[in-house]
Amino acid sequence: MTKKDTTYSINKEVIEEKEYSTLNLGPTHPATHGIFQNVLKMDGEIIHDAVPTIGYIHRAFEKLAERRPYAQITPITDRLNYCSSPINNMGWYMTVEKLLGAKIPKRAEYHRVIIMELSRIADHIICNSVIGVDTGAMTGFLYIFQWREKIYEIFEEICGARLTTNIGRIGGFDNEWKKAAWDKIHAFIAEFPKALKEFSNLLERNKIFMDRTINCGPISAERALAYSFVGPNLRAAGVDYDVRVMNPYSSYEDFTFTVPVGTQGDTYDRFMVRQHEMWQSLSIIEQAIKKMPEGPMHADLPDFFLPPKEQVYNNMEALIYHFKIVMGETDIPKGEVYHCVEGGNGELGFYLISDGGRTPFRLHFRRPCFIYYQAYPEMIKGIMLSDAILTMSSMNVIAGELDA
Amino acid sequence: MELLNKVHEKLKEHFHGDIESAELLYDYPVFTIQKDRIHDVLKFLKEDEELNFHFLTDLCGMQTADEKQLGVIYHLHNMPKNYRIRLKTFFDINKPEVATATDLWPAANWMERETYDFFGVRFKGHPNLKRILNVDEMDIFPLRKEYPLEDQTRVDKKDEMFGR
């Protein structure tokens, strides 16, 4: 055992050894909004270092997908970013359609745009209102959260489910949307701007909120690109990358909208980018309703599209197709595609390799959360614990997407 | 097609003989690169002034159909010009080693850990190569085809009638 020299001469500088305390933030902590664990090395209340542990809700989606027919993979995609599952569904359908080379009618594409923008609003409502809660402003959350509920009611009218929607089919939609759904959409468009304006008034120019969020957890554009940030988080750092503009899919080129961009990449900018995106989404929905073309709701893909029930009972071909689809007996051409859509958190990619069988040979999800969450330790270095919580909620890390 | 030729010309100039194939799959130019040179190619593509693939969109692993090889797939993106390409590299499953890309993109860190976790690809030079989504005690690499999803002793799912 070595004895420490405890005698100091007066001239000798006293060197204190700094001791850090270790704090386990998570895995289940109400402030982390999901199952994330961070082992923090703390200097008082300042974070010195953080080690994230992830994988608590890993469900082996990529392995599961290798045993499932294509239509049955849609419910898996629901559970990636469960705050905006219709976007994941549509992204998956478009990937398969790209592989098949299917041409989707404009009407179905416009419907897809409406449903995707609605779920983008739902996603951003969750993220932004929770930023408010984490700064101590519960009011905004209570006011705006009922509008997310109204969006879920619209989903319910269209497909019967609310959170894990499984909306639509490969090739389009199963049915025309009911009148009840349209009524709810029209009511939403008419009334939501008022609620969103109210929410903006509560927070956007609120001195307390601004003091709390400006310069909290910033990231520069260079670092954000190096960490492969996408979506609102990258745009908050000042890079105007949006998949909807860069690689338009599902007729996004038909609509005019602006891509809001921040400058500093801090929590306030991320909040503001999402806030403005909600207005843009509303405008896109309005344009889509106004320009809605006539035509069928689905492409001519009998291999994937359940035939109408009365034909199944009276027509042999329809019965065969019905059986084949339900049993997952349709072969897919050989090929490999990568398709990406602008999800709630940015570029959500599907990399699909098909060997010509009934199930994918390999399916990889490019999950934006998983890729940008690794910048979190760097972003919270040197800031307070309470700001770290705020940074995490403003990055909108969704456990389902993180862990797949 | 234009992009494919452009990148191919550039690569041929500097890495003649290391490009195993170049093709256009749907809208993506795809290059298969020799595994010893993959890091040099990535570095070249990132730093070349004209191509400048500065953004690593995705990195993932795969296993070939004959189950003898593993592969790593890189999706690169040049945002201002909107160029997207895919690079692939394959190596023997018994010696799954490839150079890391973490020195080029910090984003590759977790994606390479994920690839290691599921396929057992060892990335040389990776700062912290350990499992990320699965438990640390796991001793298999679950996405390899040798580990079937379901218990293969089950007979109730065998369905000769429909040729599964």
Image (cartoon, coloured by chain):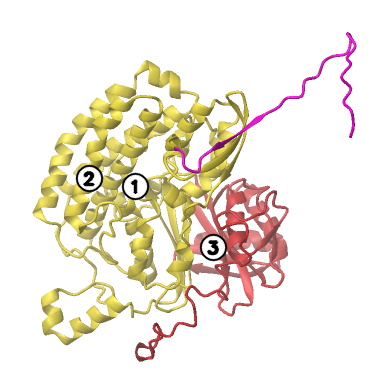
Chain colours: A yellow, B red
At a point 44% along the width and 51% down the height, the residue shown is A401
Q: Judging from the image, what secondary structure is the residue with disc 2 in?
A: helix
Q: Residue furthest top?
A: A10
Q: Which mark is residue B4?
A: 3
Task: Tell me which secondary structure the magenta stretch mostly adopts.
Answer: loop
Residue with the mark numbered 2 = A151
Q: Is residue A81 left or right of residue A376?
A: left
Q: Residues within 10 Å of mark 3 (few under 14, many from 20)?
A: some
Which percent across, then down, holds residue A59? Answer: 46, 59
Between B64 and B25, the one nearer to me in the picture:
B64
Between A391 and A16, the one nearer to me in the picture:
A16
Residue with the mark numbered 1 = A83
Highlighted magenta segment, given as a residue range: A1-29
Q: Which mark is residue B23?
A: none
Q: Nearer the viewer, mark 3 or mark 2?
A: 2
Whether residue A19 is in magenta: the answer is yes
What's the distance in space between the residues labelled 1 and 3, CA to CA? 37 Å
Which percent across, then down, holds residue A168? Answer: 25, 61
Q: Are marks 1 and 3 on the same chain?
A: no
